[in-house]
Amino acid sequence: MALAAAEVALAKSITPIAKFGGKATKASISRPLLHIRASIDSATVTPPARGKGKKEIKETLLTPRFYTTDFDEMEQLFNKEINKNLNQSEFEALLNEFKTDYNQTHFVRNSEFKEAAEKIQGPLRQIFVEFLERSCTAEFSGFLLYKELGRRLKKTNPVVAEIFSLMSRDEARHAGFLNKGLADFNLALDLGFLTKARKYTFFKPKFIFYATYLSEKIGYWRYITIYRHLKENPEYQLYPIFKYFENWCQDENRHGDFFSALMKAQPQFLNDWKAKLWSRFFCLSVYVTMYLNDCQRTAFYEGIGLNTKEFDMHVIIETNRTTARIFPAVLDVENPEFKRKLDRMLGINQKLLALGESQEMPLVKNLKMIPLIAALLSELLAAYLMPPIESGSVDFADFEPQLVY
Ligand SMILES: [Fe+2]
Ligand SMILES: [Fe+2]
């Protein structure tokens, strides 16, 4: 609840600039701020079909959010007749990169998986399942978004459309691989059910760009950081899926680079004061959500030998540095005050969670929540108003897709 409240509050506190909402076109698709952005909804995990009595486990997870966008506007943005900024040769180069399909043979399982899953018992088992489920939902959600964009942009811009289709190929692989991981724990995520049953949040294309760029890059930094850590500390390698993260995260990196190229083709989203405010807003929203989310699941990160806060700060700092190459402004996350603010938000969030779980009457709970939400909002606003770092450039003519590490 607290997180959802924080997100709503964040949106409300800075919405005078532009409004979320508006008409969504018929085809609804979904997109989380991949891996991290969350809303409280129940996800459905079912045992595989052969399991006796199809049992639905209700989870009160912070599962990734689903999005829908304005596809008519998307079509206009990528219409070569209307938008003269579209650098088709750059998109063709990117398309060739995606066609190469570096990870075609990467996602092959072996017998280690099931054996490792059986050894994970006790509280850690549930945390692993939650990790697989959340990641799978996020990847699958990306698959749906890219697939729909690939379909809708086919006529207007076949090159961009094909890239989206190839990215949906990658995300389908990622989601499928994670869902097979869930099968090792005798569970399966009902993706068909999720597609139909979940609520969708509308984001204008501009916001889809900011959010998706950030989620791909933060996903890259999360995966590569976990991979490197476990390579150095193999005693924490509890489940083989992490061994696949090295090549896997390069997919996410390429996806992020593509969004970078897309934003460059829409300089109006990068070159004015509104773009700077929105860039900071999305950075803050993504970083805070990840921090609160991960600190709530610290047992998972500690289970694989990481210090949750250090891991998150590393990911935030690296993502912010990467993002500064394209966003016109980013947050000063390396200023120690930023971390102090995150920790204060964490303290307030923990109080909100404890209150949510307490036995108090609903009215009393709500009354007690008001000052906590107000405190959280004021911390968020203070973090948002910290002097930002001017960054990015809309003139990088020498853009080339590249591997970050
Ligand atoms: Fe992915
Ligand atoms: Fe991705």
Image (cartoon, rainbow, N blue to C red):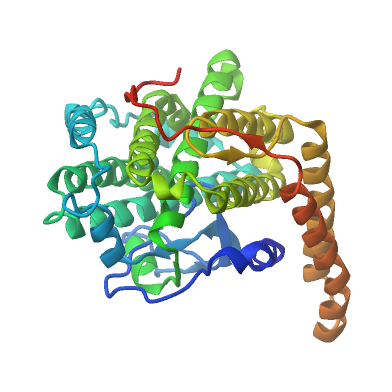
Quadrant where the C terminus sits is: top left
Residue 3 percent location from the top left of the image: 67, 61
State left or right for residue 167 relative to residue 300. Answer: left
On screen, residue 273 above or below 239: below
Residue name at image x 47 percent, y 73 percent: 21
- So how many labels did they put on this image? 0
Q: Quadrant of residue 39?
A: bottom right
Residue name at image x 51 percent, y 69 percent: 20
On screen, residue 259 above or below 204: above
State left or right for residue 228 relative to residue 74. Answer: right
Identify which residue, 138 or 321, lies in the foreground.
321
Residue 214 percent location from the top left of the image: 50, 42
Identify which residue, 300 or 7, lies in the foreground.
7
Residue 59 percent location from the top left of the image: 57, 64
Q: Is residue 126 visible?
A: yes
Residue name at image x 84 percent, y 51 percent: 347
Q: Is residue 186 visible?
A: no
Quadrant where the N terminus sits is: bottom right
State left or right for residue 143 relative to residue 387. Answer: left
On screen, residue 64 above or below 259: below
Q: Quadrant of residue 341?
A: top right
Residue name at image x 65 percent, y 50 percent: 293
